[in-house]
């Protein structure tokens, strides 16, 4: 099994990332850490606890940063609602959270683990940057950082940037420049990691303990994406990063140079991918450029059915 820690800001697609990891026989989900992003730190932390309570998984949860390293927090209620997980009633948190900060939790887990750990950030990279700043030598215990974020030709919060990188570009720059192996699962592929309205209606029709919550939640998320981007469904951005850990063939990558723009307000958070090697800059990131959407959607549908069977 592959040991991973998910750092997230639930968030509908973060929820799907957690469920995919929890349901996978290939993944050992060592912990979930939360950060402010889609919603405030209070809400993303509570949402992570609610999701893990819903699927009855006693996985350690540690709370992280309530704001970016330098900038003011930007949230995304237009996509995730005021709660951060609008669309269905989730259970009150029924699992205990850790009294340790996310940064110290990640550092401790990396130090104590006999094997390297894959970090899967699906949110602004504030916590991950703080891990690297607080204990640089811990890099040697990180197998890879497989992150949802960025985009070569695609953006969603400004014409230049994707939300996770835009919110904390300084943190993203620290991560991309860290020398740790990084896989960037960006919008170029995650906008194609789409669950259609028909597939979502199929989940609702299953009427299982998990599908009866996940279906309406995904419908909410899909409606928001249809209204704003004209998409025919819900792009499950974050779960594609987990899927890429489970089965790297679900995406096609190229090892390219990526620089994060932190200097300009106009293009703040842009991930500048040197696709043609036009600069002298060395490649530093495996950039996902292709996605096997049917394989990915199959992972998602199988995971939801597997979780439903747990409660049948
Ligand atoms: O741009 C998509 C990313 O921003 C996803 O991680 C989503 O959850 C939001 O955080
Ligand atoms: Ca997210």
Image (cartoon, helix red, strand yellow):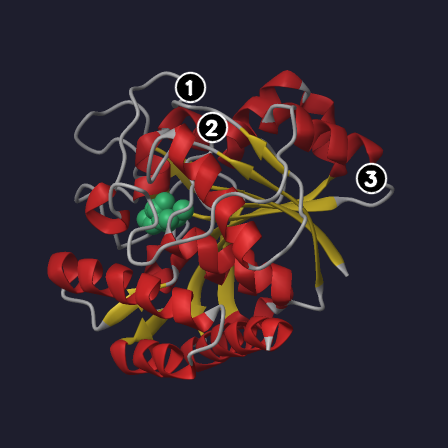
Q: Where is residue 78 in the image (x, y as percent from the top left)?
A: 19, 46
Locate the C terminus and report the quarter of the image it occupies: bottom right
Give percent across and percent down for residue 293.
41, 76
| Residue at the extreme right of the image, as rendered | 114
Residue marked by disc 3: 113
Q: Is mark 2 on a helix, strand or loop?
A: helix
The residue beneath circle 1 is 69
- Residue 273 visible in the shown view: no
**Does 50 appear above or below 229?**
above
Q: Do the residues labelled 3 and 2 touch (CB within 8 Å)?
A: no
The structure residue drawn at horizontal position 62% and vertical position 34%, both measured from the top left corner, is 97
**Residue in the foreground of this view, choosing between 153 and 35:** 35
Identify the residue at image location x=33%, y=52%: 152
The reply to whether the C-beta atoms of the residues labelled 1 and 2 are less than 8 Å apart is yes
Cα distance, mark 3 to mark 1?
27 Å
Q: From the viewer's side, name the closer residue of 65 and 204.
A: 204
Which residue bears the numbered disc 2?
126
Quadrant of residue 268 within the rendered picture? top left
Q: In this view, does 291 lie to the left or right of 4?
A: left
Decide: few, some or many residues near mark 3? Use Cα within 10 Å; few <14, some 14-19, many ≥20. Answer: few
Closer to the chain start, of discs 3 and 1, is 1
């Amino acid at each position: 099994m592959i040991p991973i820690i998910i750092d997230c800001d639930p968030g509908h697609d973060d929820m799907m990332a957690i469920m995919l990891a929890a349901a996978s026989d290939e993944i050992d989900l060592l912990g979930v850490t939360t950060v402010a992003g889609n919603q405030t730190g209070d809400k993303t932390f509570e949402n992570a606890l609610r999701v893990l309570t819903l699927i009855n998984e006693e996985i350690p949860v540690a709370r992280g940063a309530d704001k970016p390293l330098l900038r003011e927090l930007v949230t995304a209620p237009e996509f995730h609602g005021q709660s951060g997980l609008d669309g269905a009633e989730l259970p009150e948190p029924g699992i205990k959270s850790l009294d340790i900060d996310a940064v110290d939790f990640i550092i401790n887990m990396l130090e104590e683990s006999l094997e390297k750990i894959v970090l899967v950030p699906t949110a602004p990279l504030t916590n991950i940057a703080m891990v690297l700043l607080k204990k640089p030598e811990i890099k040697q215990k990180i197998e890879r950082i497989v992150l949802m974020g960025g985009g070569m030709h695609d953006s969603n919060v400004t014409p230049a940037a994707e939300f996770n990188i835009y919110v904390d570009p300084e943190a993203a720059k620290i991560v991309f420049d860290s020398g740790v192996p990084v896989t960037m699962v960006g919008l170029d592929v995650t906008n194609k990691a789409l669950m259609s309205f028909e597939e979502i209606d199929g989940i609702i029709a299953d009427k299982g303990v998990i599908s009866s919550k996940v279906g309406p939640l995904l419908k909410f998320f899909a409606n928001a994406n249809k209204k704003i981007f004209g998409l025919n469904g819900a792009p499950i951005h974050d779960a594609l990063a987990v899927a890429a850990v489970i089965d790297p063939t679900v995406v096609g990558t190229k090892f390219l140079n990526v620089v994060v723009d932190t200097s300009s307000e106009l293009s703040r958070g842009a991930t500048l991918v040197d696709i043609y090697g036009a600069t002298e800059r060395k490649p530093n990131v495996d950039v996902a450029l292709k996605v096997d959407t049917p394989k990915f959607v199959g992972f998602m549908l199988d995971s939801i059915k597997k979780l439903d069977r747990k409660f049948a």
